[in-house]
Amino acid sequence: MCRGIRTSSAHGYKTEGSALACATSIVSEGTMQPSTTLSVGRRLARHAPILAGLILANLLAWAWAFAAFADYPAQLATALLAYLFGLRHAVDADHIAAIDNTVRKMMQEKRQPSAVGLFFSLGHSAVVVFAVAAIVMAATALQNRITGFREIGGTISVSVSAFFLLALAMINLSSLRAVWTAFRRARAGEAICDEQLDLLLNNQGLLARLLRPLFKMVTKSWHMLPIGFLFGLGFDTATEIGLFAIATTQSAHGVALWHIMVFPVLFAAGMALVDTLDSLLMVEVYGWAFVKPVRKLWYNLTITFVSVIVAVGIGGLEALGLLVNKMQLSGGAWDVVAEMNDNLAHFGYFVVGVFLFTWLASAVIYKWKRFDQLSPEIR
């Protein structure tokens, strides 16, 4: 039940009984603490186990590589290339958008999303590891069929990725208007119960209920594991590393399987490192917005708008690219779509930049417009 509070507005008046801050602190047992209430040291300590585990995994992967290829500089160079492929693949636009949107969703639900990027990348990496192992053990058989499998896997991967992102966009769009209305009411000093606010930010509308089965499963970080696996079925990166393994086997006779598996492990280590850092970064960014209810409204208004644009842009581009590929469309706008899909990997850096810029701009405008004066205080 909402408690009576006193809210001062940017216009100088106060409203008794406003329910906007019936939960001034959204921190409760088992929920996340806003990052702005913690010192830098405590924030780092909170993520220390994940970061330490990732660093250790990367070091162990490289120790394995050096142990396997200490006398083979060419193989070490190939190992470095596989690692760089993992670092690059981690910032693919669909990776970043899926991770960032899922972090925001889980924080709205007051859940712990710090390992979202880690589990997403682990699921994705599993495809790479399994594929490389299969290729190494049956190189000759797969050589003749890999093109068809890659095409089928690519279609599944792009379809899942596009649907996931477009569904996120539709859910965000359905809540954007409601959040805007709630923010205007709060700015005018009207009462809004925090429970109602959570319903708005957790996307409880009709459209959200229709699409909820896909996202209902993502209530814990590890639930991103199967989604990451589905995203990884494109098989293009697995094919590249599989070809490395085949080439290595052919050029260095007698190389053991456990040596060849260094390549996908390095790929996975690099991708997990970057994707996990991205989710941790987003936890800190989103944490700023969850200290005060009005700030929570304002930030969600801005970031939801950007999320819609990003998800529609990338998901729509993937869907159009699938049409271009399957229907062999060409000319004019279709060539532009094909070119953009060929360079989709570079969009990940842009998406990270957009989210960071939006956070900074949101904080500046929040202070400039003195929205903080709308913050309620308990009587």
Image (spheres, rainbow, N blue to C red):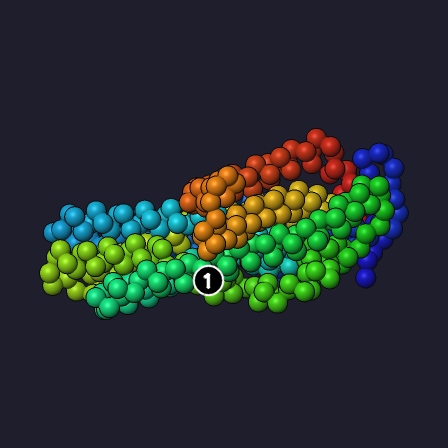
Residue 124 vertical position relative to residue 295 in the rendered view, above or below? below
The image quadrant where one finds the N terminus is: bottom right
How many numbered markers are drawn?
1
Q: Position of residue 200 (x, y in %)?
A: 73, 55
Q: Is residue 39 left or right of residue 52?
A: right
Q: Determine which quarter of the picture holds residue 196.
A: bottom right
Q: Residue at x 11, y 60 (%)?
A: 253
Q: Is residue 9 left or right of residue 320?
A: right
Q: Residue at x 64, y 59 (%)?
A: 109
Q: Position of residue 369 (x, y in %)?
A: 73, 32
Q: Nearer the viewer, residue 302 or 375?
A: 302
Q: Residue at x 69, y 36 (%)?
A: 366
Residue 127 vertical position relative to residue 355 in the rendered view, above or below? below
Q: Position of residue 351 (x, y in %)?
A: 52, 42
* Observer able to see residue 35: no
- Amino acid carrying label 1: it is Ile
Q: Nearer the viewer, residue 239 or 77?
A: 239
What is the crowding at mark 1: few (fewer than 14 residues within 10 Å), some, or many (at least 20)? Answer: some
Report which residue position mark 1 lands on.
Answer: 156
Q: Position of residue 88 (x, y in %)?
A: 38, 46
Q: Nearer the viewer, residue 184 or 54?
A: 184
Q: Determine which quarter of the picture holds residue 123.
A: bottom left
* Observer able to see residue 294: yes
Q: Is residue 124 left or right of residue 296?
A: left
Q: Residue at x 82, y 45 (%)?
A: 185
Name the secondary structure under disc 1.
helix
State the residue lying farthest toward the top.
Answer: 368
Q: Nearer the viewer, residue 183 or 134?
A: 134
